[in-house]
Amino acid sequence: MNKAIGQQQTLDQISVTALKGVGANLAEKLAKIGLFSLQDVLFHLPLRYMDRTRVTPMGGLQPNINAVIEGEVRACDIVFGKRRSLVVRMQDGTGGITLRFYHFNAAQKNRLTSGTRLRVFGETRRGSAGLEMYHPEYDLLDEAAPLPLDQHLTPIYPATEGLTQPRLRTLASQALTWLTTHNLRELLPDEVRRQLNQSSLADALRYLHQPPTDANVHQLMEGEHPFQQRLAFEELLAHHLSLLLLRRQMQTNGAPRLKSDSQLHSHFLKQLPFALTRAQARVFEEIAEDLAKPVPMLRLVQGDVGSGKTVVAALTALAAVANGKQAAIMAPTEILAEQHRINFGKWLEPLGIQLGWLTGKLKVGERRSQLAAIASGQAQVVVGTHALFQEAVDFADLGLIVIDEQHRFGVHQRLSLSNKGSSSANQRELRPHQLIMTATPIPRTLAMSAYADLDCSVIDELPPGRTPITTVVISEQRRPEIIERVRLGCEEGRQAYWVCTLIEESEALEAQAAQATAESLALALPHLRIGLIHGRLKPVEKETVMAAFKANELDLLVATTVIEVGVDVPNASLMIIENPERLGLAQLHQLRGRVGRGSAASHCVLLYGSPLSHHSKERLRVMRESNDGFYIAEQDLQLRGPGEVLGTRQTGDMQFKIADLQRDAHLLPSVKQGADYLMAHHFTLCQEIISRWLGKSHVYLQV
Ligand code: ADP
Ligand code: MG
């Protein structure tokens, strides 16, 4: 079979059907997990390994380990307990063990007669009568035909339905045989490999599929073996390159040059009730530099909660308007969009700028007139939710998109919005500039890799006069004390939030819980003015409640996590969060950021339900100890891993076969360096690396 396929062919060009035993049926199953070529089979790497290379004496067995044992059957009986089982007693001269099978047949029982010698592989556990193995694999031993032990560690592959481990092992081992006669394309240029001191790809793959018996198992298990690291590097490189490619594709389009209008700019600043912080001014300068270029800006602005990102967005929108372009400001929730509308209105309308407004919940007539104003260009700055994405929305001349609280939007959503810019016929090639603002700081290493397509600015300073928030962690059992504390605080003229959380992602249940809490608090605190806000309220109802709270017509606002993002009421200085252990650190930090916005000292009470797990205790400790979003994000990364920290953007965009962003963070600087080098000098290789690791579809992403 090998002969039919020329030796000059590389393994990515040879189909899995070249392997023995792979017919159309199996090929289809393999295709489901993305394995089409022999190269794909080789890159389907083991998750873990088992050591089946040596026999452990029974006397030396510990509970909960995988081991190979050999010995003689002493007894074999069917036992009628809760469930019928076949119980086999074995001994080897150093000790004994019991094997237990719940699924068995008569033939099996008949073979396992007393005196039969067996080799058994399985996991030990402590049973009622000493060590046991449940459903181990076993072979009958025959003195005349000795059975060789495995020569290398046994790989365990990520499997799917219909693909067993033995099947995957034979496929991999056949593919390794092909590797002796056919080449795998080495995609890293020599100079890059030399610089990184890297082994050849073939050696790495051979080793990882069949590690020798003297391999450092611990290193392999942890993914820290140099061969694993070599592949992890290439995989991270592939992800990084895919983002850089995306960026390049975006930037092959032109963008309108937006020069800042100094008169309008200073007019805007003069009417603000505060002066920009140095960090705000610096970040806007970075933005202005991008805007003046004829390629689309792709910039991420990070800043801790309350660092004042909104005003930076408004300044950016102003630059678009000054050049006769429209700006779209997109927020992830109705409440936040509403708040932006109020702020932008306050800041921009006095300068004669017309605001548009678009969310999914507008009435038909209102929606029609907003769409018309957007299409005619009369609406110069349009604030809204993701309703701005919809096809029916047609901008006259969109020059800028601002996406606030980016972690909720995926990269593809962002791209679809950027298409809005090219709708007008005479501007076919021009794309809007993009400014993305994250609510939650992202650890540096993670940002470097997850947002490689974006330039990054950091607002690393809070406006003056903020007093840090004091956070306490208190058991739910002391609820009455906390209620009393709310009463005292509000009587002194402070305002408070009481936040209810739920495990289920059900808005309805969450709303119900908040309602019940509001009612019981109203009973306990009859003299306070209490409001309630949750996701089930109509937009006007939400607006009314928020406006009342903002105007200090309510003392206490009982809320669900709908207030998580962006809500800004500086007089509120006390927050109670019920069951904070249910939320992630980033989310808690966001919530807590609703207080500490004015000059009064603020407090946050984390009212947990006991008992707390060790993990939850750790997380709440981080909250108590720090107000620094960047530090909290680092801790979140360590405690929960990158998937949780990055949120939805992660799904689909950042799934790794072998790399681990946390474990392999030390590789990222050289990944970045290598990626820049390849983009500049080996562009075609970039596309091959991406398609090897992420599949072909990624290379031809439609922008
Ligand atoms: P975030 O970065 O969390 O989105 P906001 O833009 O909502 O923060 O700003 C938080 C609060 O700080 C708002 O009340 C805003 O008006 C105020 N603010 C913003 N910049 C400054 C500044 N330079 N000086 C004083 N207050 C400011
Ligand atoms: Mg904000």
Image (cartoon, helix red, strand yellow):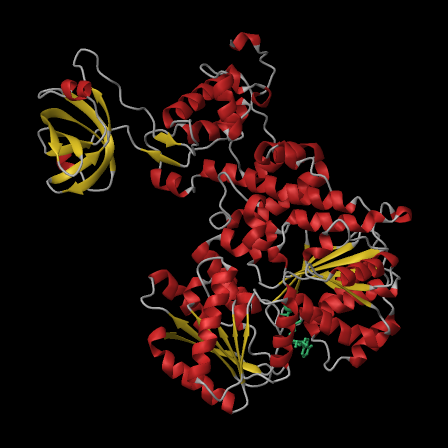
Question: Which residue is depicted at the point 76% across and 76% down?
Answer: 346
Residue 57 is at least partly visible in this image: no
Q: Is residue 442 left or right of residue 251?
A: left
Observer-nearest of 167 and 525: 525
x, y percent for residue 144: 18, 11
Observer-nearest of 273 and 201: 273
Observer-nearest of 421 and 615: 421
Q: Is residue 551 left or right of residue 129?
A: right
Quarter of the picture containing the C terminus is top right
Q: Is residue 682 left or right of residue 693?
A: right
x, y percent for residue 496: 52, 81
Q: Residue furthest bottom?
A: 492
x, y percent for residue 412: 66, 46
Residue 88 sits above or below residue 412 on the image = above
Q: Residue furthest right?
A: 426
**Number of numbered discs on residues:** 0
Residue 510 sits above or below residue 76 on the image = below
Residue 147 sits above or below residue 477 on the image = above
Question: Which residue is depicted at the point 53% across and 66% down?
Answer: 561
Residue 638 sits above or below residue 488 on the image = above
Residue 260 is at least partly visible in this image: yes
x, y percent for residue 44: 48, 31
Question: Which residue is depicted at the point 74% across and 64% down?
Answer: 383
Observer-nearest of 460 and 199: 460
**Residue 676 picture quarter:** top right
Q: Is residue 277 left or right of residue 376?
A: left
Question: Which residue is depicted at the point 67% across and 34% down?
Answer: 687
Of the four image quadrants, the one with ligand 2 is bottom right
